[in-house]
Amino acid sequence: MAGRQMEEIQRKLAVLNYPRANAAAQSLLFAGLERYSLFEWLFFRLLGDKSPFSHQNLQGDEETACIQYLAEIAKFLGITNTTDTEAIQGRGSYEDRTEMLRLIVDLVEASMFADNQEWSIDEQVAKDTQLIDSIAEKQAQIFSEDCKLFPADVQIQAIYPLPNVSELEQKLSEQSKTLLHLQQKVDDLASKHAYNPHEDYAEVESALRSHLESFLETARSFNMIYTKEIRPWTHMMEVPQLHGFGPAANRLLEAYKMLLKFLGNFEES
């Protein structure tokens, strides 16, 4: 894909009458005098006759100055946001380098040729300006929900308009007052309970360690007594088997009553 794109770039360079349009693709995409010469040629096509920069005879022994010079022109043209020397030398993958070169060549092509062969460049600029003016005049209609120009989440935001700036300022003022009130409370508590993060707590730590050691010693002693004395004693006795009253108990009760009656009769006689 990038190879085909590079072929298209070289075809456009030939149409633009660049003298070395058929140079090796690698030499145009990677750092070197061939790349720098191409950038200078393209940049001055964009700068036009009233360029604040002057042509320089690029030499291989002044590569650092050459890169800096081209980076400043690229920033001036808005191709880069900063004086980016790495962009001039070439950065990223083969596809990234090809894409950057394509964009610059397309800009030069647009500045030299009109969309319609019957138009001049000035007429093309005038029509482009007219199109932008038309878009600006009808932006409310273009960006309306009917056109569905934006994704759904952006459309939802358009349905619910943003709050008034004065309302936001009022809420911000209220939140700021609340924050200030809370900060005053914190400062008041801090003044009543002074805290020194650098204070030495060695004495408290020592006392705490002493209590913990005493507790551990007591726990060890209890564990030893329970293991050797309490547990064997509590587990040595057999659990008694308890039985409830049933039919046998009723028969015993009847026999007991008869015995009492017999003894009573025997006593009377």
Image (cartoon, rainbow, N blue to C red):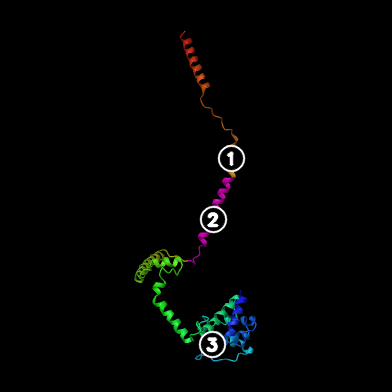
Q: Position of residue 156 (x, y in %)?
A: 42, 65
Q: Residue at x 43, y 79 (%)?
A: 132
Q: Position of residue 136 (x, y in %)?
A: 41, 77
211 left or right of 173 in image: right
Three-letter amino acid code of the residue under disc 2: Ser
Res 26 quadrant in image: bottom right
> In terms of depth relative to the viewer, which is nearer, 59 or 191?
59
- Seen from the viewer's position, the closer of residues 60 and 197 is 60
Q: Residue furthest top?
A: 269
Q: Please, what secondary structure does the residue beneath circle 2 have?
A: helix
Above or below 13: residue 258: above
Q: Which residue is mark 1?
A: 231
Q: Earlier in the sequence, mark 1 or mark 3?
A: 3
Reading the chain from its start, which is encountered first: label 2 or label 1? Answer: 2
The x, y position of residue 2, in whole percent, is 61, 75
How many numbered markers are drawn?
3
Q: CA distance from mark 1 to mark 3?
A: 101 Å
Residue ID for mark 3: 45
Q: Nearer the viewer, mark 1 or mark 3?
A: 3
Residue 221 belongs to magenta span: yes
Majority SS type along the magenta span: helix
> Do callouts 1 and 3 mark residues in contact (Cβ within 8 Å)?
no
